[in-house]
Amino acid sequence: MGLRINDIAPDFTADSTEGQIKFHDWIGDSYVVLFSHPKDFTPVCTTEFGAVAQLADEWASRNTKVLGVSVDTVAEHTKWKEDIQSFAGKPAGFPIIDDTSLNVSKAFDMLPAEAYLPEGRTPANTATVRTVYIIGPDKKVRLTMTYPMSVGRNFAEILRALDAVQATDGAPFATPANWVPGQDVIVALSVSDEDAKAKYGDLDIKLPYLRFAKKPA
């Protein structure tokens, strides 16, 4: 059975560019965006790491830590960070873990458990290591996105998805298609019209089961 929404994210201990990380301890009371890559010094992944570096202030403002996973060594990650900064104009100030063992890739269901990858492996050998996980402070998986090798990730969408996860965390509403912060939210069906009005004010009722309200501050 694969890793699913609301599963506890696998715990692990791994070396990284910022020292040894014990994952659950490292999360603390933050949200985490964990994003994986099939190999260092690859073109699409360099642009993605650069995009993440450029969003450093955005992650911090959302109480969110960012963690990169790649199947190469810490020494290679450290050299790659120089290229990322050269491309993006910002330092990649977040840790990248060494997953040469593939332990993390397998624990997060990015590779078959029996996967065997030879020395001299290429990005094609680990092409499935292209997933984003948003994990809550409770260590539960809140959202996943998986991309093919040829499609660069849209980190504006990942940031938007993080906003939506945080906006609805523990609250009786959901976000509609294309929602961005500041827009109305959808009231959960478990909440009556009367209770919703008392809690959120006037409702915009489009259909009996589709009721919009202003998100509380």
Image: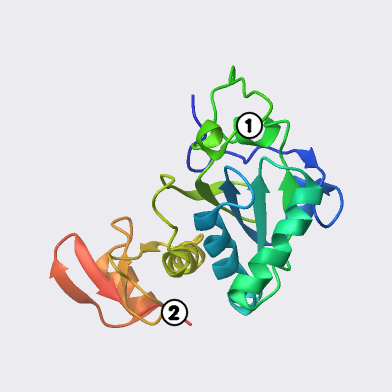
Query: From what the image shows, is residue 15 above or below residue 185?
Result: above
Q: Residues within 10 Å of mark 1 (few under 14, many from 20)?
A: some
Query: From what the image shows, is residue 15 above or below residue 3?
Result: below
Instruction: Report the colour scheme.
Output: rainbow
Q: Residues within 10 Å of mark 2 (few under 14, many from 20)?
A: few
> Residue 169: x, y in percent?
50, 61
Between 62 and 93, the one lying in front of the other is 93
What amino acid is found at the position of numbered circle 2 in the picture? Answer: Pro
Between 136 and 113, the one lying in front of the other is 113
Q: Which residue is disc 1 drawn over?
A: 107
Q: Is residue 45 visible?
A: yes
Mark 2, mark 1: which one is toward the viewer? 1
Label annotation for residue 74:
none
> Residue 50: x, y in percent?
59, 68
Query: From what the image shows, is residue 36 above or below residue 83?
Result: above
Secondary structure beneath dot 2 equals loop
Q: Residue furthest top?
A: 114
Q: Residue at x 50, y 35 (%)?
A: 124
Label annotation for residue 216:
2
Residue 116 location, quadrant: top right
Q: Left or right: where does residue 127 sit relative to residue 76?
A: left
Query: From what the image shows, is residue 8 above or below residue 210?
Result: above
Secondary structure beneath dot 1 equals helix
Q: Residue at x 14, y 70 (%)?
A: 206
Q: Residue at x 44, y 63 (%)?
A: 161
Q: Are marks 2 and 1 in contact (CB under 8 Å)?
A: no
The numbered mark, 2 or 1, whose residue comes first in the sequence reads 1
Residue 173 location, quadrant: bottom left
> Residue 162: x, y in percent?
50, 64
What amino acid is found at the position of numbered circle 1 in the picture? Answer: Ala
Between 182 and 160, the one lying in front of the other is 160
